[in-house]
Amino acid sequence: MPQQPSPGLAGNWGSADMPLLDGLWYEDQGQGVPVLFVHGWCMSSAVWGLQREAVAAGYRFLAVDLRGHGGSTVAGTDNGGFAGYAEDLVRLIRQLELQELVAVGWSLGAQAVLKAYPSLQQQLKGLVLVGATPRFSAAPHFPYGLPAKEAAGMRLKVRRSLERALEGFQRTLFVAGELDDPATAAAVAKVLSTVRLPDQTAALEGLEALMDEELLEEARQVRCPTLLLHGSQDQTCLPAASSWLAQQISTSRRVLFEGCGHAPFLSRSDCFNQKLLTFLHEVCSDV
C-alpha cells in the first residue's frame, strides 16, 4: 500500500524564505527509500511537479534548488561550476544522512550528479540521468555536443535580458507536435509557471560550466544501476550523448521517448513516471 506523505516540508513547498543547510532549499515529502531530484539550467525543484505525487506515494521524494536557483542562495564557497553543484549535493545528502538513495538529474542536474558520483557512490543505490550529456559543447574527442557558439549566444542573451532568454530557452525544450494535446500543454505550462527566475550570476555561472567543463572521466566511473532517459529529438543535449553514456556505463539501460525534445518528464509525464517507478522498484526491492 502506498505510504502517505510525511509532514516534512510539505507545507513549505515553494516558500522562498525557508533556506536550509546554509542557504540550500529543498522539498521533502513521503517516506521510504529517498529519491533526490536535481533540476537543469535556470530551472528549480518546481520543475518536477508532475513527478512529486507519483514518487511520494511510495518513496521519499526530495528535490533540491541548486545554488542561486529557486529558494537557494548562492553558497559562499571557493568552488564554482559543477564542483560547486556537486559540493551542494554532497552536503545535503550527508547532512540529511541519506543512505541507499537514487539520484535523478536532468540536463545540467545530471552533470551535477555525475560530478558528485565519486564522493557519493557508497550512498547511491542507482542513478537516473535525463537528457544527459557528459559534455555540453562539442569537441574533437566528443563530437556529440552543441557548437560552442550556441552557448556563447545564450550567454549574450542572458546578459541582455534573463527573462527573455529563458522564455526562448523554454520554447526549445519541446519539438513540433510534442505539446499538441491541450491537456498536456496546460499541465506543462502550469509547471513551468512555478519556476522562479534564477539569480543572473547563477545563470551565467551555469552557462560557463556548460561551455567549459566535461565529465567524461566521472561518467566512466559509474558502477551502480543507471537509467538513461532521453527524448529522441532532443536539440539541447543530443541523443547521441546518452548513447555514448550507455556505452561507457555497463550497468545502464537507455530509453528513448519518441517525438520528444529535452523534457520528456513534462511532455510525457505518465510514461516517464512509469519508467522511473519501474526502475525504482527494481533497484530498491532489497532495501
Image (tube, rainbow, N blue to C red):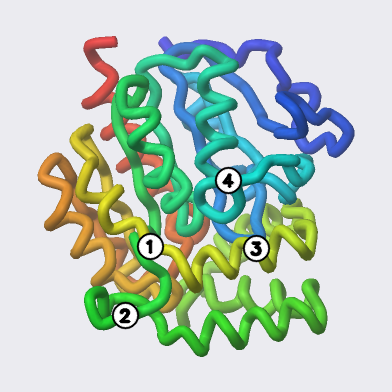
Image quarter hosting the N terminus: top left
Residue 287's tag is: none
Q: What type is the residue that disc 1 sits on?
A: Glu
* Residue matched to label 3: 205
Q: Earlier in the sequence, mark 3 or mark 2?
A: 2
Q: What type is the residue that disc 4 sits on?
A: Gly
Of 64 and 6, the residue lying toward us: 64
Q: In the rendered structure, are the residues bearing label 1 and label 2 in contact, judged by CB atoms less than 8 Å apart?
A: yes
Distance between the Cα atoms at labels 3 and 2?
20 Å
- Image quadrant of residue 245? bottom left
Residue 181 percent location from the top left of the image: 52, 68
Callout 2: SS: loop
Image point (24%, 16%), residue name: 285
Q: What type is the residue that disc 3 sits on?
A: Glu
* Residue matched to label 1: 214
Residue 271 percent location from the top left of the image: 36, 49
Tag 3: Cα neighbours inside 10 Å, few (<14), some, or many (≥20)? some
Distance between the Cα atoms at labels 4 and 3?
10 Å
Image side of residue 235 versus residue 92, left or right: left
Image side of residue 281 versus residue 70, left or right: left
Callout 4: SS: helix
Is residue 271 visible from the viewing direction of this image? Answer: no
In the rendered image, the residue lying farthest to the front is 78
Residue 115 percent location from the top left of the image: 41, 46
Tag 1: Cα neighbours inside 10 Å, few (<14), some, or many (≥20)? some
Q: Earlier in the sequence, mark 1 or mark 4?
A: 4
Image side of residue 157 versus residue 16, left or right: left
Distance between the Cα atoms at labels 1 and 4?
14 Å
Tag 2: Cα neighbours inside 10 Å, few (<14), some, or many (≥20)? few
Residue 84's tag is: 4
Residue 95 percent location from the top left of the image: 59, 16
Of 217 and 134, the residue lying toward us: 217
